[in-house]
Image: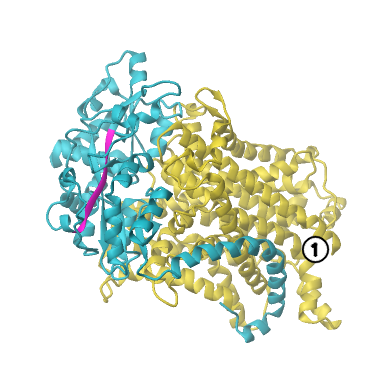
Chain colours: A yellow, B cyan
Amino acid sequence: MVLPVAFLAVFFVLPLTGMLARGFYPDGTWDFSGVAEVLGRDRTIRVIGFTLGMALAGTIITTGLGIPLAYVLYRLRFPGRGLLRAIVVMPFVLPTVVVGVMFRALLSTSGPLGSLGLDGTPWSILLAYIFFNLAVVVRTVGGTWEGLDTRAEDSAATLGATPWQVLRTVTLPALTPAIISAASLVFLFCSTAFGVVLTLGGLKYGTIETEIYLLTTQFLDLQAAAVLSTLQLIGVVLMLVLAQRARSSREQSLRRSDGQTLRRPGLVDLPALVIAAGAMVLILLPVGTLVWRSFHDGDGFTLRAYRLLAEPEAVPALRVSVLDAMENSLRTAMDATLIAMVLGVIVSIAVSRRPRRRSARRFIASLDAAIMLPLGVSAVTIGFGFLITLDRPPLDLRSSAILVPIAQAMVAMPLVVRTLTPVLRGVDPRLRQAAAALGASPIRASWTVDWPVIAKPLLAATGFAFAVSLGEFGATSFLARPDRPTVPVVIFDLIGRPGVDNLQMALAASVLLSVVTVAVMSLVERLRVQGVGQL
Amino acid sequence: MHTTTSAYARSRSTGTLALALAAGLGLSACSLGSTDDASSDSGATVDSATSEVVVVSHDSFTVPEDLLTQFTEETGYEATILGSGDGGEMTNQIILTKGSPLGDAVFGIDNTFASRAVDEGVLAAYASPDLPDGAADDQLSGTGADLLTPIDFGDVCVNIDDVWFAEEGIKPPSSLEDLTDPMYEGLFVTPGANTSSPGLAFMLATVGNFGEDGWLDYWSDLMANDARVTSGWSDAYSVDFTAGGGNGDRPIVVSYASSPPFTIPEGETEPTTSALLDTCFRQVEYAGVLEGANNPEGAQAFIDFLLSEPMQAALPETMYVYPVDDAVELPQAWAEFADVAAEPIVVDPAQIDANRETWVREWADIATQ
């Protein structure tokens, strides 16, 4: 328990308070003079409203599309299911600048979907929110759904319930904690989205996150940035408290089964299939454009961009080839995944217990929420905070290479916790008590009761954490050393330079990054079949 | 970080699971992770403060490996480069870490941020004996001249797709004023001044050209003429520009004087685009010694190195900028097709710093509504 708490204290609370102090306590005295002024600006109000509205809309639509898609991909059996599951995850690791450029290529007036007139409107931002976050819903909800015992549903159906009634009264209640988990993650990701908002919103639409970025990095208006960061923090805490209330009142012990057979899709599944197909189109269009364009320059089909990926000299401005950067990426992601998994599992197990003491329950609830906070606070604030707080012994870490995996782990950890906790909370505590009554040590009890249940989601969470670390750009670009860049950092660099070769290499590198991610994730998922079979 | 014994005892099951997990994952992670730490950490910490020079820069700064080796051989210092976002972000980081500097030297503060860095007292005086004569024009005025050494410059200019204009039979524009001509309605795209450094430079070009009284009116006219504002240079150039590889629909874009050579089609000798040299704003990049540096001598040696002939000659290929030393030979395509403005549009750095936030807000009110 000390480990995750200390981790959060050093790498989150310390930098955050450091930056807030620079804003509110600049010269050794408290100074709130700018607060009223910042809050009174028209722009501030507009930005807050826009951030909240967009994040809410993004969350609702993503969840609405993601649940049917999770059903189709995790409960039905059809050819190509594995491939589709993998494709759903691809957007999650694509660098936002690349996705922004692909969306604009599709939607701009000269693009294939230009006639829709969506370029530069909030709709395009919303589409991007959905595009990025569907994976969160599908994996979090799908993971629970897949292991759900179907016998309750079967009995309800036998007793005459219509499929809709079964879904409403049996299945959805069992899934609710997982759905709320997923929705709160999506909300956090949407409300702190940065790159896509800048690229697709065409500047008209600022969010709190983009404002904080501008105020901090361009204007150095630290007080205004601190005001907005505080607002952001309050909003996120409120959201997390609400989500926790909603979740804990609906939690129930779930019956789980492992070796159940998946159904073939039938007529009943038509609505779900239609929605799922729509969601897949939304993912495939930009991904397809990306892949297609990486193989086509102005003159036709070419593998040139892919050949250049191996050559450090292809672009004199970069000191490493894209393949070298891939090696850096994989190493860093390994370390980040390790950190995220160790800490994430500790937290998940801790927060899934239901201690009798009230104070202990409180502590657990706040830890549960605290682990999510880093997703809801501006990366710029934390990044600048690192610089001013981790600058002297014993925490002289500013230029240490270890900060990169740590920053990535901070983003991946909440996903691990949110994937594992619903599953662990679903374990009937009486099983553990029964094991103990039969003479099992706590370790033995946990091993026989928790492990079989957690094994599958654990591997899924590992794969997910790995993907997040591979794709993470914001914090990494801030901390990575230029001689050891990760792939997203290289892509960002390439796309910011003129020349068709550079653009194409950026696209090819994005394709490579997502293919590697998908390959690693399916490898990890394949492991689980054996593991669970033996238990 | 270690768990205390009591905490460990309380969450034994937790520990076991974590251990099992660490064992499984660790097998693969350690094999990669261990070499990782060995090579990267030793470089940063084992070297004593006297032999390592830490150079803070923006993300676009790259030095060819062989030149870095040469620097170490000639001076005995080993340079470590820390990238910190774009030029503005980096400058603000340096100011924020005053008293506990991120490194010894800084490279990449440009003339739009220079006066802020000079005024904040984060730089130590150094005048390099190697500053070429031709670079005097690029020096800052006042105290800034003692603190910052000009290294390179780049011109942000309106670029046009010559092929497009030839095919359409329309006379191409040549000045900023032309862009508000109805003849060019809906043909111009620029990155935004609040999200992009060339975007800011172009905004400053309009301030310099039309004066503090006239530039906002110019932007109103420009927007009325259906100009498009994107967030970054990359999507303006590679999505909207007709000659940027993305089949865009706008033949006029804000880019650099050095962009045209990149549009020479394969097998041909001439670019399909050109820069309008009467529309350019010059960005000069400076280097300086950070106040409170561990290794000020090393920082000074690095600044001299930046002015050395091989490094100056490498600037165009690595960073797409022009060396301040005009005696250095440019790459052939640059010499032919990447002229710089004879008289770039100028705005006083102190005036820029005093008004940046106001101007950008005023700009945003007009250009992003």
Q: Quadrant of residue A362?
A: bottom right
- B233 vs A115, nearest the viewer: B233
Q: Is residue A470 left or right of residue B219?
A: right
* Magenta highlight on residue B15: no
| Label 1 chain ID | A
Q: Could you say whether the residue bearing mark 1 is in a helix, strand or loop?
A: loop
Q: Is residue A356 visible?
A: no
Q: Residue at x 77, y 57 (%)?
A: A528
* Residue on which disc 1 sits: A255
For disc 1, the neighbor class at 10 Å (few under 14, some 14 to 19, many from 20) is some
Residue ranking furthest to the left: B142
Amino acid type at mark 1: Arg
Q: Would you say the magenta stretch is mainly helix, strand or loop? A: strand
Q: Nearer the viewer, residue B155 or B80?
A: B80
| Residue found at x 78% / y 73% | A447
Range shown magenta: B147-157
The answer to which quarter of the image holds residue A336 is: bottom right
Task: Measuring from the top left, give residue A104's x and y in whole percent.
Answer: 47, 35
Q: Is residue A265 left or right of residue A143?
A: right
- Residue A449 visible? The answer is yes
> Residue A486, image x and y in percent?
52, 52
